[in-house]
Amino acid sequence: VLMSETESQKEDLRQFVSFIIAGEEFGVNILTVQEIIRPVEITRVPHAPEFVEGVINLRGRILPVIDLRTRFGFPEREQDDDMRIVVVEIGEQTIGFMTDSVQEVLRVDVNSIEPAPEIAVGIDAGYLRGVAKLDERLLILLELENILSDDEAKELQGLDQERSEAPAAAQGAAA
């Protein structure tokens, strides 16, 4: 009996949603993903951080959308039919992440996950949970909680209120 218990512990699988950004394959824990949607009309927000594409209205909820290309310092690209917004919950916040395309749901053995190399595709190591080796490919696992600093997360929380306050702020600036 003991043998089978340890064997079952060996197979510790996690599920990740995989997506492509600038030719690299990334994964996020499926438990954080609420849904995956086609890009909808994105409303630009004045004074938003550069990596914030804008906000979308998702069934009456206003969500900030972060362009992961910009966040990771990759060149921008025209929107196309493959692009998807991965809607995730980080702490108390729901945020959309713009990706080039969503691939699949992958089952990854936790034991195959290694710490991210320091120079992983030029992305800040704080964003990375690690790298999973899958047959012939590497899946770069993102630590979504770290993609925003605390200050940035606070800034984003203000985005859905920003619209109602914008005119007042503009008047203050003019005075």
Image (spheres, grey):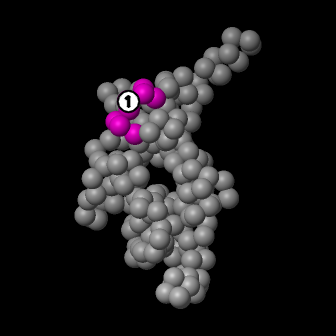
Residue 55 lies, in percent from the top left, at 48, 72
Based on the displayed image, in which of its 4 quarters is residue 3 positioned? top right
56 over 146 or under it: above or below: below
Residue 34 lies, in percent from the top left, at 57, 58
Q: Is residue 12 left or right of residue 48?
A: right
Outermost residue, top side = 3
Reply yes or no: does residue 58 show up in magenta: no
142 over 175 or under it: above or below: above
Residue 167 lies, in percent from the top left, at 53, 87
Outermost residue, right side = 1
6 over 116 or under it: above or below: above
Residue shown at 45%/42% (left/top)?
Answer: 27
Residue shown at 41%/66% (left/top)?
Answer: 53
Q: Is residue 86 left or right of residue 21?
A: right
Going by the numbered disc 1, the residue's amino acid type is: Ile
Residue shown at 56%/64% (left/top)?
Answer: 156
Q: Nearer the viewer, residue 157 or 12?
A: 157
Q: Is residue 10 visible?
A: yes
Q: Nearer the viewer, residue 134 or 52?
A: 52
Q: Main secondary structure of the magenta part?
A: loop
Q: Is residue 99 left or right of residue 96?
A: left
Give SS at disc 1.
loop
Write down the region rendered in magenta: 116-123
Q: Give the residue pinned by disc 1.
A: 119
